[in-house]
Image (cartoon, rainbow, N blue to C red):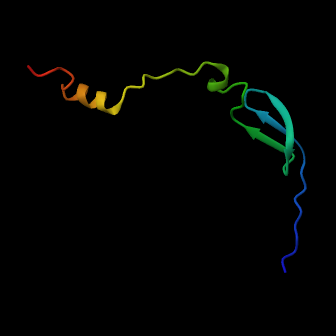
Amino acid sequence: MAKQTNVEYKDCTVTCACGETFTTKSTKETITTEVCSKCHPFYTGKQNRTSKSSNVEKFKAKYGLDKENK
């Protein structure tokens, strides 16, 4: 029978590249990350929206089919 291994969770400090720190629970004592909710473009509102044209519209524009044939 396998020996039971209990994972020990402890308080952990997470540090972002932008300098933001917060605490959570983890098996590690420190975690370093590149982005967090304070600096990620989606959460800060700095994310640019791209135009969402469909593949059909792109195809028609590429081959000149968007103009009606007369």
For residue 58, side relative to residue 29 (left or right): left
Q: Point out the image quarter for the N terminus.
A: bottom right
For residue 40, side relative to residue 29 (left or right): left
Residue at position x 87%, y 59% from top? 7
Residue at position x 33%, y 33% from top? 55
Q: Position of residue 29 (x, y in %)?
A: 87, 46
Report the front residue among 62 and 29. 62
Report the front residue among 15 and 40. 40
Q: For residue 4, what is the image quadrant?
A: bottom right
Q: Where is residue 35 in the image (x, y as percent from the top left)?
A: 69, 32
Above or below for 5 versus 21: below
Above or below for 23 versus 48: below
Q: Position of residue 58 (x, y in %)?
A: 30, 28
For residue 10, side relative to residue 62 (left or right): right
Residue at position x 85%, y 52% from top? 27
Q: For residue 25, what is the image quadrant?
A: top right
Q: Point out the image quarter for the C terminus.
A: top left
Above or below for 51 versus 13: above
* Residue sticking out furthest to the bottom: 1
* Residue sticking out furthest to the left: 70
